[in-house]
Image (cartoon, grey):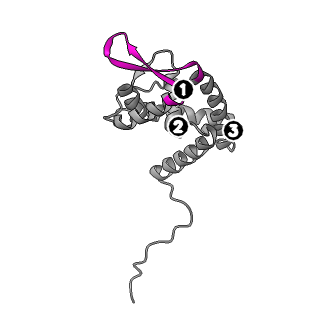
Protein backbone atom coordinates (compact mmCIF):
# COMPACT_ATOMS: atom_id res chain seq x y z
CA UNK A 1 0.00 0.00 0.00
CA UNK A 2 1.47 3.36 -1.07
CA UNK A 3 1.75 6.10 1.51
CA UNK A 4 -0.17 9.30 0.72
CA UNK A 5 2.39 12.13 0.56
CA UNK A 6 0.10 14.81 -0.88
CA UNK A 7 -0.13 18.03 1.08
CA UNK A 8 -3.39 18.55 2.93
CA UNK A 9 -5.91 20.66 1.07
CA UNK A 10 -6.62 23.96 2.75
CA UNK A 11 -10.32 24.68 3.22
CA UNK A 12 -9.97 28.39 4.01
CA UNK A 13 -7.47 31.21 4.21
CA UNK A 14 -4.37 30.81 6.37
CA UNK A 15 -4.92 31.80 9.98
CA UNK A 16 -1.37 32.56 11.07
CA UNK A 17 -0.59 36.02 12.41
CA UNK A 18 1.65 36.99 9.50
CA UNK A 19 -1.03 36.33 6.93
CA UNK A 20 -3.76 38.02 8.98
CA UNK A 21 -1.70 41.16 9.62
CA UNK A 22 -0.53 41.40 6.01
CA UNK A 23 -4.05 40.96 4.67
CA UNK A 24 -5.47 43.53 7.11
CA UNK A 25 -2.66 45.93 6.22
CA UNK A 26 -3.35 45.59 2.49
CA UNK A 27 -7.06 46.17 3.11
CA UNK A 28 -6.23 49.29 5.13
CA UNK A 29 -3.93 50.60 2.40
CA UNK A 30 -6.68 50.03 -0.18
CA UNK A 31 -9.15 51.94 1.98
CA UNK A 32 -6.63 54.77 2.41
CA UNK A 33 -5.95 54.91 -1.33
CA UNK A 34 -9.52 55.96 -1.91
CA UNK A 35 -9.49 58.42 0.97
CA UNK A 36 -6.27 60.27 0.15
CA UNK A 37 -7.15 60.70 -3.52
CA UNK A 38 -4.57 62.65 -5.46
CA UNK A 39 -2.25 63.36 -2.53
CA UNK A 40 1.38 62.94 -3.66
CA UNK A 41 2.64 59.47 -2.70
CA UNK A 42 -0.76 58.34 -1.43
CA UNK A 43 -0.70 56.74 2.02
CA UNK A 44 2.99 57.58 2.50
CA UNK A 45 2.27 61.20 1.67
CA UNK A 46 -0.64 61.15 4.11
CA UNK A 47 1.64 59.87 6.89
CA UNK A 48 4.23 62.54 6.18
CA UNK A 49 1.65 65.33 6.00
CA UNK A 50 0.00 64.06 9.20
CA UNK A 51 3.33 64.28 11.02
CA UNK A 52 4.17 67.67 9.46
CA UNK A 53 0.85 68.97 10.82
CA UNK A 54 1.85 68.13 14.39
CA UNK A 55 2.80 71.07 16.65
CA UNK A 56 6.46 70.02 16.89
CA UNK A 57 8.01 69.76 13.41
CA UNK A 58 10.69 67.17 12.63
CA UNK A 59 13.47 67.02 10.08
CA UNK A 60 13.43 64.62 7.12
CA UNK A 61 15.61 62.03 8.81
CA UNK A 62 13.34 61.93 11.87
CA UNK A 63 10.25 61.70 9.66
CA UNK A 64 11.81 58.86 7.68
CA UNK A 65 12.50 56.89 10.88
CA UNK A 66 9.05 57.58 12.26
CA UNK A 67 7.34 56.46 9.04
CA UNK A 68 9.68 53.51 8.42
CA UNK A 69 10.88 54.93 5.10
CA UNK A 70 14.30 55.05 3.53
CA UNK A 71 15.81 58.53 3.87
CA UNK A 72 16.30 58.81 0.11
CA UNK A 73 12.59 58.11 -0.47
CA UNK A 74 11.74 60.77 2.09
CA UNK A 75 13.56 63.42 0.03
CA UNK A 76 11.33 62.82 -3.00
CA UNK A 77 8.21 62.56 -0.88
CA UNK A 78 8.85 65.89 0.85
CA UNK A 79 9.86 67.49 -2.48
CA UNK A 80 6.50 66.47 -3.98
CA UNK A 81 4.48 67.57 -0.93
CA UNK A 82 6.34 70.89 -1.02
CA UNK A 83 5.67 71.32 -4.74
CA UNK A 84 1.97 70.75 -4.01
CA UNK A 85 2.11 73.57 -1.43
CA UNK A 86 1.30 71.25 1.49
CA UNK A 87 4.58 71.38 3.45
CA UNK A 88 7.54 73.67 3.74
CA UNK A 89 11.12 73.26 4.85
CA UNK A 90 12.01 75.75 7.58
CA UNK A 91 15.36 76.28 9.32
CA UNK A 92 15.80 74.31 12.53
CA UNK A 93 16.51 76.88 15.28
CA UNK A 94 18.65 74.29 17.08
CA UNK A 95 20.71 73.19 14.06
CA UNK A 96 21.18 75.60 11.17
CA UNK A 97 22.29 72.72 8.90
CA UNK A 98 18.91 71.02 9.31
CA UNK A 99 15.48 71.87 7.92
CA UNK A 100 12.25 71.05 9.68
CA UNK A 101 9.24 69.84 7.72
CA UNK A 102 6.13 71.81 8.62
CA UNK A 103 2.64 71.81 7.11
CA UNK A 104 1.65 75.01 5.34
CA UNK A 105 -1.76 76.59 5.98
CA UNK A 106 -2.96 74.81 2.82
CA UNK A 107 -1.47 71.56 4.17
CA UNK A 108 -3.27 72.00 7.49
CA UNK A 109 -6.57 72.59 5.67
CA UNK A 110 -5.98 69.54 3.47
CA UNK A 111 -5.10 67.50 6.56
CA UNK A 112 -8.50 68.32 8.08
CA UNK A 113 -10.19 67.01 4.92
CA UNK A 114 -7.96 63.94 4.87
CA UNK A 115 -8.64 63.13 8.52
CA UNK A 116 -12.37 63.07 7.78
CA UNK A 117 -11.92 61.00 4.63
CA UNK A 118 -9.59 58.48 6.30
CA UNK A 119 -11.87 58.20 9.34
CA UNK A 120 -14.78 57.38 7.01
CA UNK A 121 -12.67 54.85 5.09
CA UNK A 122 -11.51 53.21 8.32
CA UNK A 123 -15.07 53.13 9.66
CA UNK A 124 -16.15 51.33 6.50
CA UNK A 125 -13.26 48.88 6.81
CA UNK A 126 -14.19 48.14 10.43
CA UNK A 127 -17.97 48.16 9.85
CA UNK A 128 -18.30 44.48 10.78
CA UNK A 129 -16.91 45.18 14.26
CA UNK A 130 -18.92 46.53 17.17
CA UNK A 131 -17.72 49.77 18.79
CA UNK A 132 -16.32 47.71 21.68
CA UNK A 133 -14.46 45.42 19.26
CA UNK A 134 -13.09 48.43 17.37
CA UNK A 135 -11.80 49.96 20.61
CA UNK A 136 -10.32 46.60 21.64
CA UNK A 137 -8.60 46.29 18.24
CA UNK A 138 -7.06 49.75 18.65
CA UNK A 139 -5.93 48.93 22.19
CA UNK A 140 -4.36 45.64 21.12
CA UNK A 141 -2.64 47.20 18.10
CA UNK A 142 -1.19 49.98 20.29
CA UNK A 143 0.23 47.32 22.62
CA UNK A 144 1.65 45.31 19.72
CA UNK A 145 3.15 48.46 18.19
CA UNK A 146 4.74 49.44 21.51
CA UNK A 147 6.34 46.00 21.88
CA UNK A 148 7.18 45.79 18.18
CA UNK A 149 9.19 49.01 18.32
CA UNK A 150 11.76 47.00 20.31
CA UNK A 151 12.37 44.78 17.28
CA UNK A 152 12.61 47.52 14.68
CA UNK A 153 16.20 48.72 14.70
CA UNK A 154 15.49 51.42 12.12
CA UNK A 155 12.51 52.74 14.04
CA UNK A 156 13.79 54.54 17.12
CA UNK A 157 10.62 56.33 18.17
CA UNK A 158 8.48 54.86 20.89
CA UNK A 159 4.79 54.16 20.52
CA UNK A 160 2.75 55.20 23.51
CA UNK A 161 0.19 52.51 24.39
CA UNK A 162 -2.23 55.19 25.57
CA UNK A 163 -1.89 57.43 22.52
CA UNK A 164 -4.92 57.71 20.23
Q: Position of residue 119 (x, y in %)?
A: 65, 33
Name the mark nearer the viewer: 1 or 3.
1
Q: Quadrant of residue 89?
A: top left
Q: What is the C-alpha distance between the residues marked 2 and 1?
A: 10 Å
Residue identified by numbered label 2? 40
Q: Earlier in the sequence, mark 1 or mark 3?
A: 1
The residue segment tinted magenta is 83-106
Decide: is 105 above or below 145. above
Q: Which residue matches tag 3?
A: 130
CA neighbours of label 3 inside 10 A, class few (<14), some (14 to 19), many (20+): few
Q: Which mark is residue 86?
A: 1
Give the image location of residue 10, x and y in percent.
Answer: 52, 67
Label 2: few (<14), some or many (≥20) within 10 Å?
many
Q: Residues within 10 Å of mark 1 (few under 14, many from 20)?
A: many
Which numbered disc flags the more N-terminal residue, 3 or 2? Answer: 2
Instruction: Report the predominant secondary structure element of the magenta stretch.
Output: strand
Verify CB contact (< 8 Å) between mark 2 and mark 1.
yes
Task: Report the front residue among 89 and 150.
Answer: 89
Residue most extreme to the front: 83
Q: Residue furthest top?
A: 93
In the rendered view, would you say 25 is above or below 7?
above
Amino acid sequence: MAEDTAAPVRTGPPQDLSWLLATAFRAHLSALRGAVGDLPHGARGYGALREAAEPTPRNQAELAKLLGLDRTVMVYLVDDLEAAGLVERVPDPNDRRSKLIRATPAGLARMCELRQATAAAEAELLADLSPAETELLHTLLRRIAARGARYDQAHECQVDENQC
